[in-house]
Image (cartoon, rainbow, N blue to C red):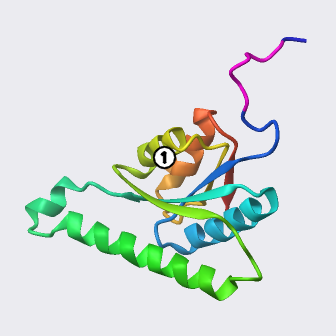
Amino acid sequence: MDKLPASFERGTDGPKVIVVGVDGSDSSWRAASYAAGLARRQRALLAVVYVQPVLAAGAALGASVAQTTEQVAEELIQEIRRATEQLRGVFEVRWEFHTFRGDPYNGLVQAADELKADAVVVGASEQAGHRFVGSVAIRLVKAGRWPVTVVP
């Protein structure tokens, strides 16, 4: 039996950091709920990640994309805070909120790398075109760098 390289430590004692991607969609909230339960049971840190899209076309249309995505990030963190306050004393989980910029796949990869994630949780894509092009979840699984859980 081949021995794993000494540098591989992830997963030996359960996850210490679980990254979950949120974007405000129903499937991302289900993923966040699942990841929160997993983090609670494993006593892991839940890193909630929102990837702010960079849309070059938005600037051409006169829209303030950066301002809009900052507002989305603020709304997401407020929703998370409300949920954790409602569950205080019943459901305790350590969590942090992070924002990254870019496309969702590369943003989640960067987040998982920088936060030294042991697992990544994402919601299933709600866009029909992803059946042909490939969803963020499929791309994360194919990357093969972390265990990835896709929540329907």
Q: Is residue 99 left or right of residue 11?
A: left
Indicate the position of residue 151 as horizontal and vertical percent values. Answer: 68, 62
Vertical arrangement, residue 149 with respect to residue 5, above or below: below
Q: Quadrant of the C terminus?
A: bottom right
Residue under label 1: 111
Q: Residue at x 51, y 46 (%)?
A: 134
Q: Nearer the viewer, residue 114 or 129?
A: 114
- Which range is magenta? 3-9
Residue type at numbered disc 1: Ala
Q: Which residue appears farthest toward the right when viewing the image?
A: 1
Indicate the position of residue 96 as horizontal and vertical percent values. Answer: 53, 62
Indicate the position of residue 55 as horizontal and vertical percent values. Answer: 23, 56
Q: Nearer the viewer, residue 112 or 27?
A: 112
Name which quarter of the figure residue 65 lies in.
bottom left
Looking at the image, can residue 152 be seen?
Answer: no
Name which quarter of the figure residue 64 lies in.
bottom left
Indicate the position of residue 2 as horizontal and vertical percent values. Answer: 85, 11
- Queried whether the magenta region covers residue 32, the answer comes back as no
Q: Residue at x 64, y 65 (%)?
A: 31
